[in-house]
Amino acid sequence: MQARNVVKVVVAAVVVMVVVTCAAAKPADEDKKNRVYNGKLSDEEHFIHDEHNPDYDHEAFLGEDEARTFDQLTPEESRDRLSKIVDRIDSDNNGVVTEEELQAWIEYTQKRYINDDVKRQWSTNNPENRDVLHWEDYKARVYGFIDNMDQNELDTEEDDGMSYQEMIKRDKRRWEAADRDGDSTLTLQEFTDFLHPEEATHMTHIVVLETMEDIDKDNDGKISLAEYIGDMYRGGGDDESEEPSWVSSEREQFTEFRDKNQDGFMDEEEVRAWIIPSDYNHAEAEAKHLIYEADSDGDAELTKDEILEKYDVFVGSQATDFGEALVRHDEF
């Protein structure tokens, strides 16, 4: 999981440690930072300036990597590959795709991204393919380059606002939270929780804590309106002149919905309710949205023809080289 979401990316020569913030590629004043989790399907915003953003649907349906590759295809190639995908979504082979089948597919594409990322990073950090990964080995592989740095360099903040010393401290804390048996090593499943804490219930407190640390610039244990806006928009603060329209909308969101006790700040529980909402299933909502967009006969399910007719809703007008994924038939 470009992010720009809940945790900072540790940029190292060997591995990008925290994929939770994969959306951080665009400057905050060019694109809105999205920190909401709970099954978030894309780092794209679903609506931009009240206009529907089709890129969100493409990433939700295909996964980020596939959606990006699909952009290289012609419309004819897109339809052809989409046709093959539809055959796999239709799990009972009855010729129609139901909301449940579409939701299951969307959930699968998200899990596939996480599984592929974990396998890649496990292999990078555990080349001997041992059953467990030791903290000291991980630290040496990810942060070994700092051994030749002087103290000033170690204490200097990087682009994400943290020094390498602070990064190590944060990673160790997250490691210990993921290490459920307390043996200072991580199994593959524990390593998954370490890399993607937003996917593990017992790691929720770490996600919330890291978010608080990222946004709470004055370290007073709460998030002000200025800090909330400043996290998403570099021109933030109290001056609303020449701000994008969404900034004004976010100010209203903070005042009317985020700050539930109306004390002018977001505390830990209010941040938790914001970034990990408990009453919203993104995959279900996206499945309903896609059916609404493509269901021409109104029967609440989709034929292949209906999907191909609206192929740009699912994969874009130049849309993902799903060829590599298709040969991995055991995953479909």
Image (cartoon, rainbow, N blue to C red):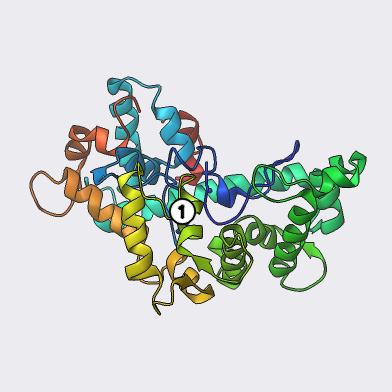
> Is 58 above or below relative to 129?
above
> Is 76 above or below relative to 159?
above
Q: Residue furthest left?
A: 297
Q: Is mark 1 on a helix, strand or loop?
A: loop
Q: Where is residue 86 in the image (x, y as percent from the top left)?
A: 30, 40
Q: 97 or 319, which lies in front?
A: 319
Read off the residue under disc 1. 237
In this image, 204 relative to 133: left or right? Answer: left
Residue 17 can be seen, yes or no? yes
Q: Which residue is drawn at 50% across and 76% down?
A: 269
Q: 247 or 47, which lies in front?
A: 247
Q: Where is residue 127 in the image (x, y as percent from the top left)?
A: 80, 43
Q: Residue at x 37, y 46 (%)?
A: 45
> Which class describes the residues within 10 Å of circle 1: few (<14), some (14-19), or many (20+)?
few
Q: Where is residue 287 in the image (x, y as percent from the top left)?
A: 28, 53
Q: Where is residue 274 in the image (x, y as percent from the top left)?
A: 43, 66
Q: Residue furthest bottom?
A: 261
> Is 66 above or below relative to 282?
above
The quarter of the image holding the C terminus is top left
Tag count:
1
Q: Residue at x 38, y 46 (%)?
A: 60
Q: Which residue is drawn at 77% across and 60% down?
A: 169
In this image, 137 relative to 297: left or right? Answer: right
Going by the numbered disc 1, the residue's amino acid type is Gly
Residue 97 can be seen, yes or no? no
In this image, 315 relative to 267: left or right? Answer: left
